[in-house]
Image (cartoon, rainbow, N blue to C red):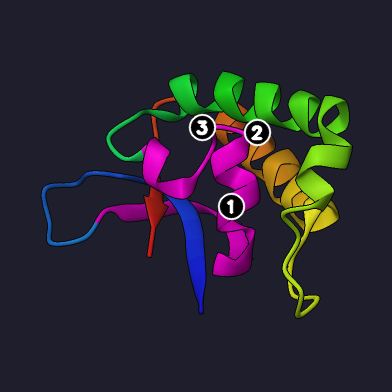
């Protein structure tokens, strides 16, 4: 399973209007993201202006804690530290481009 992550703006409708796609991310990365304090569930209700610095810090921490995080990589080979870094880089970029938008996780 996976999360589809984008950023959107609440237009008052049933779903937010999509502003930009971040990417699809496997649930197998959940433990790594939790260790970095940047799990998709942590983004709920936060604007991109708040999420970007958290994701940027998580990206920096991923290099400092690499050995610890490698132990959390999924045994099936789907995901891992490099995959998380790719996701975090994209999340930071999209959030910095759209600071008033909100992350949307489906």
Name the residue tied to disc 2: 92
Marker count (numbered) = 3
Q: Which residues are magenta?
A: 16-43
Q: Quadrant of the C terminus?
A: bottom left
Q: Nearer the viewer, mark 1 or mark 2?
A: 1
Name the residue tied to disc 3: 98
The answer to whether residue 26 of the structure is visible from this angle is: no
Of mark 1 and mark 2, the one earlier in the sequence is: 1
* Residue 96 in the image, given as x and y percentages of width and height: 60, 27
Identified at 21% across, 60% down, the residue is 15
CA separation in Å, label 1 and label 3: 27 Å
CA separation in Å, label 3 and label 2: 10 Å
C-beta proximity under 8 Å, tags 1 and 3: no
Identified at 65% across, 48% down, the residue is 32
- The magenta stretch spans residue 60: no
As drawn, the label of residue 31 is 1
Residue 93 sits in quarter: top right
Name the element at disc 1.
helix
Name the element at disc 2.
helix
Name the element at disc 3.
loop
**10 Å neighbourhood of mark 1: few (<14), some, or many (≥20)?**
some
Q: Nearer the viewer, mark 1 or mark 3?
A: 1
Identified at 49% across, 66% down, the residue is 4
Between 64 and 103, the one nearer to me in the picture: 64
Residue 36 shown left or right of residue 71 in the figure: left
* Residue 3 in the image, given as x and y percentages of width and height: 49, 66
- The magenta stretch spans residue 27: yes
The answer to whether residue 86 of the structure is visible from this angle is: yes
Q: Nearer the viewer, mark 3 or mark 2?
A: 2
């Amino acid at each position: 399973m996976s999360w589809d992550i984008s950023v959107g703006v609440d237009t008052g409708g049933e779903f937010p209007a999509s502003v930009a796609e971040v990417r699809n991310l496997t649930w197998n990365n959940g433990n790594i993201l939790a260790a970095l304090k940047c799990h998709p569930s942590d983004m709920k209700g936060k604007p991109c202006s708040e999420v970007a610095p958290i994701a940027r810090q998580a990206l920096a921490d991923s290099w400092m804690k690499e050995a610890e995080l490698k132990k959390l990589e999924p045994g099936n080979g789907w995901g891992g530290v490099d995959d998380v870094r790719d996701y975090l880089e994209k999340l930071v970029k999209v959030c910095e481009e759209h600071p008033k938008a909100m992350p949307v996780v489906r």
